[in-house]
Image (tube, helix red, strand yellow):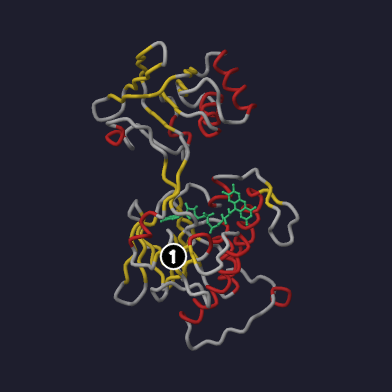
Amino acid sequence: MIQTDIIIIGAGPVGLFTVFEAGLLKLRCHLIDSLPQPGGQCSEIYPKKPIYDIPGFPEILAGDLIDNLMAQAAPFKPGFTLGEAAMTINTMNDGRFKVTTVKGTEHCAPIVMIAGGLGVFEPRKPPIDNLSIYEDKGVEYIIRNPNFYQDKTCVIAGGGDSALDWSIFLAENNIASSVTLVHRSASFRGHLDSVQKVIDLAEKGKINLITEAEVTGLEGKGLLEEVIITHQTQGELRKKANHFIPLFGLKPSLGPISDWGLEIEKNAIKVNTLDYSTNIPGIYAIGDVNTYENKLKLILCGFHEGTLAVQSAFARIFPEKKNVLKYTTVNGVQGF
Ligand SMILES: Cc1cc2nc3c(=O)[nH]c(=O)nc-3n(C[C@H](O)[C@H](O)[C@H](O)COP(=O)(O)OP(=O)(O)OC[C@H]3O[C@@H](n4cnc5c(N)ncnc54)[C@H](O)[C@@H]3O)c2cc1C
């Protein structure tokens, strides 16, 4: 079981900055995120967009902000459980919380900070009857480790950047033994450069590009062996495949957190603005995931909320200790 002072659910910008503020109070943090990388919406939705309302940065790319927040948190050596959604929370006999992920990883701490943003990003799935039978038996919705596909036959579906970029990556680096990209339209939503690259690789025979078509069926005894592709004019095609990877994007949902006995209003967690505590003592909610009067879903507001919440967490963990605010200009950053 992973033990820490504060379990932070959500490694978005607010969760990451909270690690820094907790570290200044000598509190250790462990972050859990259902996504395979830290950064929340900034990394997943708009890494290349400039943000103009981060104090002190007239302009910063969302991806660069996350890199900076990771560097700022680094001295406090946060732990990470990535690619796993936090599913359940239980109170243990000693009063600490146990948070268990979808893969069964257990974490325990006296404080839980929910920085879950818009919630868990769930993959958009194609409407194929027997899809769930092949999940983790050949069907994946996120590419976590490209080497997993070494010498495998892969069919990727989708028309956005993920589908284009991964098709290029698996084909160009000679990872998969064959790469087929299936898209229902003749035009793509992704970057023009990537579209051109896919077309070039298709001409060289490194990607089998099938447009105006959808994967409509899956077959295989136990593991996936074949996909059925329905083309708008040519009808049914069959393609041998060890893997079918539909990359149709992710949609957020508050998910398991909504069943934890927390007071929920408008799909967000109600908090006390004194310290951003929830109705369950020891559990706080910060950033986009919380709601209160005049709430603004902005990164800078989440930074403020995390800062006040860790002060309250400190008082809860060490009721006998007095915490005196110390400027970083005076004390510097004393990492672990
Ligand atoms: C296109 C776009 C542009 C934006 N521009 C700006 C801007 O200019 N300025 C600004 O201030 N804000 C902007 N925002 C809003 C800003 O991105 C959010 O306010 C910010 O991301 C909130 O940070 P967060 O850490 O609270 O949540 P998020 O960034 O949403 O991160 C939450 C994380 O929690 C994880 N999670 C949730 N539930 C679980 C669970 N049960 N288990 C494990 N992990 C879980 C999610 O996977 C996610 O990674 C923009 C948003 C978008 C979409």
Q: Which residue is mark 1?
A: 269
Along the horizontal axis of the image, is 126 left or right of 310? left
For residue 218, above or below residue 135? above
Within 8 Å: ligand 1 and the Cβ of disc 1?
no
Near-viewer residue (25 or 35): 35
Residue at x 40% of width, y 63% of height? 2
Where in the figure is residue 6, as x and y percent of width and height?
A: 47, 69
Which class describes the residues within 10 Å of circle 1: few (<14), some (14-19), or many (20+)?
many
| Residue 126, position as x, y percentages in the image | 38, 32
**Residue sitting nearer the eye, 132 or 5:** 132
Q: Which residue shows up at 42% across the image and 12% down it? A: 233
Q: Residue at x 56, y 24 (%)?
A: 172
Name the kind of residue labelled 1 in the image: Ile
Is 329 located above or below residue 246 in the figure? below
Quadrant assignment for ligand 1: bottom right
Q: Quadrant of residue 91?
A: bottom left
Q: Residue furthest left?
A: 221
Question: Number of callouts in the render?
Answer: 1
On-image quarter of the C terminus: bottom right
Q: Find numbered disc 1 in the image and state the secondary structure of the residue it sits on.
A: strand
Q: Is residue 196 left or right of residue 259?
A: right
Q: Position of residue 64 (x, y in %)?
A: 66, 50
**Quadrant housing residue 308:** bottom right
- Residue at image coords 51%, 27%: 167
Q: Position of residue 137 (x, y in %)?
A: 31, 34
**Picture quarter with the N terminus:** bottom left
Would you place residue 41 above or below residue 200 in this image? below
